[in-house]
Amino acid sequence: MTTKPPFHSDRPAEKDLLGWSNFAENLAHSLSLPEGSESIVVGIEGEWGSGKSTLIGLIKKSLLPEGNTEPKPSIWENISNGFAKLIRKSSLAKGNTDPKPSKPIIIEFNPWMVSGTEKLVEVLITQIAAGIGKDSGKKGLETAGKVLQYFALLKNLKCLKSVPESHTAVAGHIFETTGSMSEDAHKIIEKHLSKIDLNERRSNVFDGLVKLNRSLIIVIDDLDRLPPEEVRSMIQTVKAVIDFPRTLYLLAYDRSIVARALGSNNEKDGLRYLEKIVQVAYPIPPLSQQQRRKFAEEKIKHLLSELKITLRPFEEQLYESAIDQVARLSRNMRDIVRIVNRLLLILPITYEEVNVADAIVFEALSQRFPELRENICNHSKFFLGGNSLPDHLPTDRLSMEDWAMEREKEDAAKAKAQQDGNSPWSKFLLEDSEERQVADSACRFLFSSFKDAPAMDGLRIAAPSRMAYYIRCVTIDGFFGAEKAHDILSYPVKLEQTLSACNDKELPDFLNFLIIYIPSCSNLDIEGCIEKLIDKSQHVVKFDITNKISEVMWKLLQHPASTLDARNKFLLSIMEKTPIHVSGRFICAAKMYISKDNAPLEELIKKWIDRAREVIKGGLGGDQLHYVLYRIVTLQRNSYDEVHAITSKMCETDDGLDKFLSGYDDSKNDDLRKNDDLRRKLHKRFDIIKNLEHVISCIEKSSLNAKYSWLIEPLKEWKNYSNSP
């Protein structure tokens, strides 16, 4: 992938991928009006993104094919239906001996480029005059001048302040002398009245257009993007001001939006008014799924070619289904263009690590349902088969028991959804049945593969580490690529240098990147990386960083290159050399994911518990003490016996009481009386106390009473609750 193609603009499609050419050509042939015709307004109606501008472009192309200066034969020459005959007869009846229309003048105007109602009308009429005067010889220039004179008078009469001084002086003179006019005054009035006669100026334009003997086709696109007052101004201008003979106005708009503008938010009234203005309306129906699929396939195929991406066999198997999903997730062509632009940024980054078909569908899903994307990131267990993203493992303040309880709740919710015949992610889908089906289908494509081990080898996004990698890739947070990450993981000295260079704010993100890239690193130096991470853990205090270090080391041991013997060796090294809270987290993770009958692991657990006892005796306190106590409970099969004995003994001395109770300091400033959730969370953390009454008594009798008296009330509340039947 050596080239980077530009973004795809939202301009009309030049190539007909929807099969509209025949319709556009037939419609184009009917737009050139015969001599003697009055003005007609034709509407192309469709929602935003439905392809109105694309259809307009195809019509213009049919009117004046590329490389041909002459228009295609008009419908008046080729079609012999009754309506055409009627127009011919009408034209001949008015004395027109040659009803064959000459080459039409095509004038394009986009009102969205102009701001203000007065400016809109001014620029439109100026554009019409320019179109008439261009390539139409002397007659065209004369007619263009008449159009401008007509507009100049319109503008002056609309607001007296804008009338030139010569005209206002004449008008004043006329009004002052009406009572006693001389013959000379009559001559002056007669001379200047013709200059301010609007009907005469209008007739001059009509005469000029008749002599020009060419029909006008005025194309006005994006009418529905204007503010309501400007929409009304444009419609009024077309209908009342510039309803020139032999002129066809081709308007493109969203029917509902324009109707609300015309009816002052009353769509029903606006529609009645619109029907009086537009003689012929062609509504563009919503694109069929087949049309959307064809358009999406063409665009994405072209993008992959531009990016020089060749699909791998496991991606080819999914590609056609992925295009089907894009067609379902897209409502119109504009959606597809936006999806392609998202992929333009993302595929060059993710191609090596993530299945291209998954990336295509995930971006289409993210665009259509942005809130669902957020839920995939924040509640990944419901989508990734019971696994979480690396960022969503147990938090600093959450005990293993609380974490386990949270997992049980999520598992129960997933089980209930499946019992009800729903997908695990059904709770995050919209209530609307159609939208729900579209989103569910995309999720099934993306996340059903977590149960299929061979499918996971195809770089499927359902793998938690790969999803985490993907999210990091598409997030603006200083992301670096796989090549650099693999280089760091292959050379521990570079890992050491990077760990030293990162500050406490940057370090968690860097460690997350390592977690993402470890599975795909082929030259991984597991032993060297673990040694550098152990060294770093000995100099870090913050829980969020030490937790991440534990996760990176655990990911290293999960790599296919890590043998069983090597894994046991590394486990022992981590248990002995890292701080007690780091090794405790690591050993708990190992216990959760390694087979229960693993004798070396059981021996490590015993050694860690012995080490924890010694550290506690050595004066461990505060957050780290509580953290270690909960790990002891977990590793002793959720038994609180030893932990209760430890905490009871600590409360017998002021020093021990202080070390133990300081672990609750993070809740001291919380408004516990007003916040039930905070109070319940604090109560839950009293489960490492066996005798609540004993602790209350110790606080009351201790010299630390003033420091910890705030704990007495919640302790009593929990005591009463625990003793209640």
Image: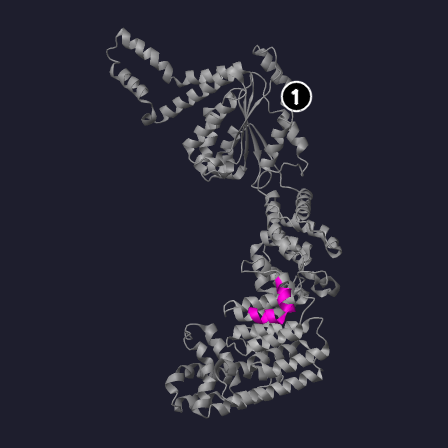
Left or right of 172: which side holds 87? right
Residue type at mark 1 is Pro
Q: Which quarter of the picture shows residue 448?
A: bottom right
Q: Residue at x 38, y 87 (%)?
A: 705
How far across and down, in percent of the image, does residue 592 sit? 65, 77
Task: Find residue 470 and report its horizontal and vertical position in percent.
Answer: 62, 60
Residue at far front of view: 493
Observer-nearest of 4 and 419:
4
Q: Is residue 518 part of the magenta span, yes or no?
A: no
Q: Residues within 10 Å of mark 1 (few under 14, many from 20)?
A: some
Colour pattern of the rendering? one colour
Q: Main structural element of the magenta stretch: helix, strand or loop?
A: helix
Q: As drawn, is 567 to the left or to the right of 144? A: right
Q: Position of residue 258 (x, y in %)?
A: 50, 37
| Residue at image coords 49%, 32% | 273
Quadrant of the image occupied by residue 496: bottom right
* Relative vertical location of residue 345 with respect to residue 32 in this rendering, above or below: below
Does 101 sit above or below residue 224?
above
Q: Is residue 492 visible?
A: yes
- The location of residue 711, given as percent across then percent down, is 42, 82
Q: Is residue 101 left or right of residue 147?
A: right
Disc 1 element? loop
Pick the front one: 78 or 341 = 341
**Residue 579 in the image: above or below residue 277:** below
Magenta-drawn segment = 484-498
Residue 566 lies left or right of residue 184; in this view the side is: right
Q: Which residue is mark 1?
A: 73
**Is 485 one of the magenta-colored residues?**
yes
